[in-house]
Amino acid sequence: MKRFKFILQKEFKQIFRDKGMLPIIFLMPIMQLMVLSFAATFDVHNINMEIIDKDQSSLSQQLISKYASSSYFNILQNTPYDADNGESLQTGEAVIILEIPQDFEKNIIHHQPTQLSAKVDAIDGMSAGVSVNYAQSIIRDFQDNYLQEKGLLLKNGLKINISNLNWYNNSLNYKFYMVPGLLVLLVSMIGIFLTSMNIVKEKEIGTIEQLNVTPITKAEFIIGKLFPFWCIGMFVLSLGLSIAKLVFDIPIQGPLSIVFAFAMIYLLVVLGLGLIISTLSDTQQQSMFIAWFFMIVFVLLSGLFTPIENMPGWAQDLTLLNPVRYFIEIMRNVLLKGASWADVKMNFFIIGIYGIIINALAVLLYRKTN
Amino acid sequence: MEKIIESTELTKTFGDFTAVNKITFDVKKGEIFGFLGANGAGKSTAMRMLTGLLSPTSGAATVAGYDVFTEQEKIKKNIGYMSQKFSLYNDLTLMENITFYGGIYGLSNTQIKERGEKLIERLDLGNIKKKLLKEVPLGWKQKIAFSVATLHNPKVVFLDEPTGGVDPITRRQFWEMIYEKADQGMTVFVTTHYMDEAEYCHRISMMVHGEIHGYGTPKELKKEFNAQNMDEVFIHLARGDQYNLK
C-alpha cells in the first residue's frame, strides 16, 4: 500500500497539470447545469393558435377571448372561413387550429350538441398532447361558466369537479424535476469519459508497457486510476447541489447524507465501467465512442426525460441494469419527496452489488501479461 | 558463473505464425548480452516473454531464477526495462518520474531522494530537474530512461533498441553508462540494430526468422562466419537465411 501513495501522487499531478482538461472537468458541468436546466423544459407556453370562427356570434367571440387572455395561447389569426386550408400547420406557423362551426351559438342555445374541431401539429407528441389538454380545459371552463350563467348547472344534476393537488412539486416547476436528474447525468458523464480515456491514453503514449513490467499490482493500478476521478466526481456533485440550491432553489426535503453516501458507491460503478472501457480499447477514439454509446443508452433508459412507467415492459426491464436510473431515483426521491434511508435501501443494495461486480471485472480485465 | 537468464526451446506462436521458435541460450551475471536480428526476426517477442509481458507458448525459461510461465510478477520485481519508445511521463518532471518509479519499485523516500540526486548529478541534469520531460531533447531522455530503469538496482535490465534515433556522441555516452552498470554486477540484455554496438557486447545471439542462428562472443562469430566485422556477420546471416531454406 506504500506504493499506492506514489500512484495517487502521479495521477493527481497529471490531471491537474493538464490545462486543457481542467475547464472541462470543473467549468463544463457548471455551465451545462445552468444552461440545460433552462433548456430541458416540458412547460408549454405561447402555443401559436389559428382560429377559424365560422359562427361569428357573440358566444364564439366569448370563447375566443378566453383563449386570447390565456398565457398558454398566442392567437395568430382569427378568420371567418378556412383561408389557407391548414397551410399554417404545414409551414409550422401554427401548432393548433381551432375551428368553431356555424350554428355554434344556435346549437348551444337550443341544447343541441355541437362540435368544435382542433387540428394539432403532433410531430412532437408530448407537446401536442399538452396543447390539446390546455385547449380542452379552456373549453370546459367556458362551458361551465355558460351553464352557470344560465342557471342550467343544477338542472343537469350532479356535476363532478376534479381538483388537482400536486404533491412533492406543487408548483409543477419542471426544474425541480429536471435539475437533480441533470446533475446525476453530468457527474456520470465526467466520470465515465475521464476514466475511459485514462488507461487507453497510457496505452497510446506507450507508458502502460513500462508500468506493466513493474511490480505494481492490478488492484493498486485500478484503484490508483479510480480514486482521483472519484474525488473529482464527489466535488462536482457538491458543486452542482450547491448551484441547484442557490440558483434553482431546489427543495431538499430528505437527508443529503443519503445522496452523498449513494454517490460514493455510484461513482465507483461509473468509474469502474469507464476503466473497463479503457482497458478494452486500443485508442482513445475507440473508448470515447464506446463510452458515448453507453452514456446515450443510460440517459434514455434512466427516466430522466421520459418516465420509466411509460416504457414497454422489456425496456423497463432494461432500465434495471442502468446505474443512472437508481441515482436519479435517489436524487428525486430524497430531494423532492424527503425519502428516508429505509425508502431507498433497495437502491443501495443494487448499486452496491453493481459496484463489486464492475470493479472486480475492471481488475480482472486489466492484464499485465498478455 | 551464475546464469541469470536461461532459456530452453522457448517458443511463442500466434495462431499459425511462429514468432519465436525454440530459442535456447543463457545470459551470465554481469554480462552485456546483445540480442540481434533484423526487423521482425522475433527479438521483441522474445524480450516480452522474458520480461513477463507475454506468456510463452512452450519451452522453458527462467529470469533471475523465476519461471517465465508462472512467476512473471516475481520476475518484474527483479528486472528493469527500457522500451524503444520513450515511456517515462512527459507531463511530469525528471524528479517526479524518479519518485514515481522509485516508489513503484518499493524504494523508501530517502532512497528515492539519494538515488535521484546521484542520478541527476551523474547525468549533469541539475538545471532541468524541475522541467517537464517533454521539454528535454531525445538523447537526454534516453539516458534518463535508462537511469530510471536501473534506479532500483535490478538484477537484469532489458533494453529494447535503446539508442534508436540518437546521435553518435550520446550513443557513446549511453554505452559508457551500460558498462558502468555491468561493472557493478548488473546484467544487461540489449537489442540493437547498430553493429558497432554489437561489438561492445560480451556475447551475442543473432535471431533470424524466430530462431537463433548465431550465438557466441563477437570474436567467435566473426571467426565462425569468416567476417571482418559484425556488419558482415549480420548480413551473412540475415541474407544467408534465404539460401539456407533450400
Image (tube, rainbow, N blue to C red):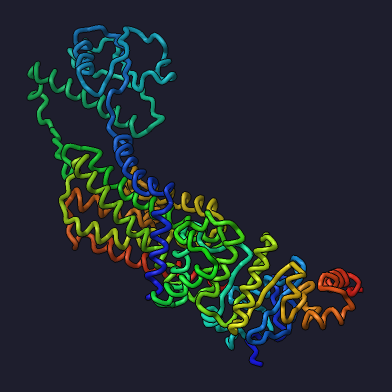
> Is B13 located above or below residue A254 in the figure?
below
Q: Is residue A257 visible?
A: yes
What is the quadrant of residue A250 in the picture? Answer: top left
Q: Nearer the viewer, residue B41 or A305?
A: B41
Residue placed at 33% from the left, 55% from the top? A233
The spot of residue B197 in percent (x, y) is: 73, 71
Which quarter of the rendered picture does the C terminus of chain A lie within? Answer: bottom right
Residue pictured at 24% horizontal, 63% vertical? A345
| Location of residue B82 in the rendering, given as x and y in whole percent from the top left corner | 59, 69
A45 is higher (above) or lower (below) than A281: above
| Residue B163 in the figure: left or right of residue A64 | right
x then y, percent, for residue B164: 68, 63
Q: Is residue A312 visible?
A: no
Image location of residue B155, percent across then percent down: 57, 83
Q: Residue at x 79, y 73 (%)?
A: B208
At x 38% / y 25%, what residue is drawn?
A121
Foreground residue among B84 and B140: B140
